[in-house]
Amino acid sequence: MAPASSALKYAPTDDVVVVEKEEEEEELILAGRVPPVPLIEGWLPGGNAELDGGGGGDDPSTNIVPMDARALSQMEREVLARVRTHYEEVLLGGDDDGPAFDNLPEEMVCRVLRTMMKRHSDKPRDVPIQTAEMLMATLKWRKSIDADSLITRTLEHTAEYHGGWPTRVLYATDKHGRMLVYDSIASIDSEYLRMISPEEVELLHAQLLECISIERRRRCAMSPARMRVYSHLHILDLEGFSLVDAMKEHVLRTCKTIFGLSKRHFTGCVYKIYIVNCPLAFYVMWNVLAPWLPHDTIAKIRFIRGSG
């Protein structure tokens, strides 16, 4: 497994700052060892997009508030009002006992709204109902799996999944405080995926994404940039990639499950995906994977060939 310091070269150097730590590097902690933290609010009307009005301190490069830290624009608020109407119509007219719209997490509302506005930019009239339906579906799904307690539970195959696919959070951020999440193909043992069903993969990966969300909020509160960002950067290192292994049925099935989960219930959580050390053989697999991804996700992906 590559150390964090060596992985930093894979992200654009002008966007990355190293956060010095005296402690030894830690891997992402699961199963309740990451302390829950309160959601940092501030995107909806009346909220401030910067913690304590800090604006990033004396560094001019951090004074520009990124999109995912800004309060909603006037146009976004107008769309949000229509989202509220559709949401409340579904809530009142159906059997769902979901929370009132005003009780929804601001982070979820804003990232889903902005994602759907991009995803359906060619059909803006569809955005309010699509956003309301995605919020309702995500809340229903979270309730069905008891997502709020997910990281405190030891699931079947927890050790195999998180040990065989060791995702790491690096001690580094971009200039706005977005954390870096790192996966190395060389560290993944794909054979364990044979024993895990798609339903189990979805629950196990949701556990990982919940943990990342908690850590992201904690990093926001600690970041020198003092920004409330709801997305992170993801680095996928393909050094050691094998097309023969990657095209196996159980590997493709797992990828499809993970992509579907992120699209449905964690939309907007990733700002950019850097796929590094791309061998030519990977583009064969990419032709299989790309149709499973929404166009707005594909637009976030950057391919970097070579050794970084």
Image: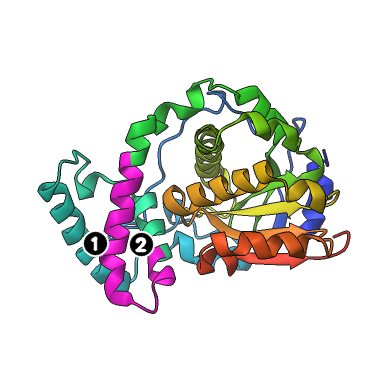
Percent position of residue 214, x then y: 50, 38
In the picture, the disc for residue 173 is none
Q: Give the residue at x 30% y 40%.
A: 140
Seen from this angle, which residue lies furthest left?
A: 93
The residue that mark 2 highlights is 113
Q: Which residues are magenta?
A: 116-140
Report the side of 116 relative to 223 (left or right).
left
What SS does tag 1 mark?
helix
Seen from this angle, which residue lies furthest bottom?
A: 122
Percent position of residue 296, x then y: 51, 68
Q: Amino acid at mark 1?
A: Val
Report the side of 165 relative to 294 (left or right).
right
**Residue 21, above or below 71:** above
Q: Amino acid at mark 2?
A: Leu
Percent position of residue 161, x then y: 64, 30
Report, in whole angstroms, how far the alpha carbon at label 1 lies from the one at label 2. 8 Å
Q: Is residue 120 magenta?
A: yes
